[in-house]
Amino acid sequence: MHDTPTTPVIPGWRLIISDAGRFWAFRTHVFSRVAVRAGAESAVDADTFDEVQEAVAEQEKTARAAAFVEEVTS
């Protein structure tokens, strides 16, 4: 795997493009326990940058929803 200066950026996530051209994104800070229990994943992969960006957005959405539910029910 390689990580080059030309690699696209997703704020808060480290993006790696494998030698085979597959995109991997790893969150730079761990999700809360509540987010993890709700299903938020801190690592995602996809065939294209657009797809991995969508996967990251879905994980962040899951984490935000979990935090909202926790706040409302606390």
Image: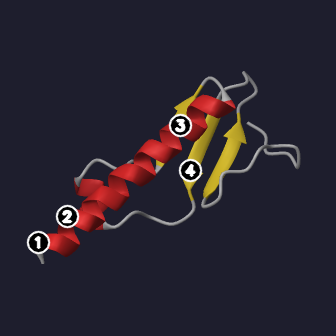
Q: Is residue 33 above or below residue 2?
A: below
Pinpoint residue 35: horizontal percent, then vertical percent.
30, 59
Which residue does the numbered mark 4 point to in the structure image?
26
Pinpoint residue 69: horizontal percent, then vertical percent.
20, 64
- CA–CA distance in space, label 3 to label 4: 14 Å
Residue 53: quarter of image: top right
- CA–CA distance in space, label 2 to label 3: 23 Å
Pointers 2 and 1 in contact (CB under 8 A)?
yes
Around disc 4, counting alpha carbons within 10 Å, would you say few (fewer than 14), some (14 to 19), or many (20 or more)?
Answer: some
Identity of the residue drawn at 34% across and 67% down: 32
Disc 3 marks a residue whose amino acid type is: Glu
Disc 4 marks a residue whose amino acid type is: Phe
Which residue does the numbered mark 1 point to in the structure image?
73
Identity of the residue drawn at 85% across and 45% down: 4
Front one among 41 and 51:
51
**Tag 3's secondary structure?**
helix
Q: Upstream in the sequence, badge 4 or badge 1? A: 4
- CA–CA distance in space, label 4 to label 1: 30 Å
Q: Upstream in the sequence, badge 2 or badge 3? A: 3
Around disc 2, counting alpha carbons within 10 Å, would you say few (fewer than 14), some (14 to 19), or many (20 or more)?
Answer: few
Q: Which mark is residue 69?
A: 2
Q: Which mark is residue 54?
A: 3
Identity of the residue drawn at 60% across and 61% down: 12
Screen quadrant of the C terminus: bottom left
Disc 2 marks a residue whose amino acid type is: Val
Around disc 1, counting alpha carbons within 10 Å, would you say few (fewer than 14), some (14 to 19), or many (20 or more)?
Answer: few
Pointers 2 and 3 in contact (CB under 8 A)?
no
Give the number of the mark in front: 4 or 1. Answer: 1
Screen quadrant of the N terminus: top right
**Tag 2's secondary structure?**
helix
Front one among 21 and 58:
58
**Tag 1's secondary structure?**
helix
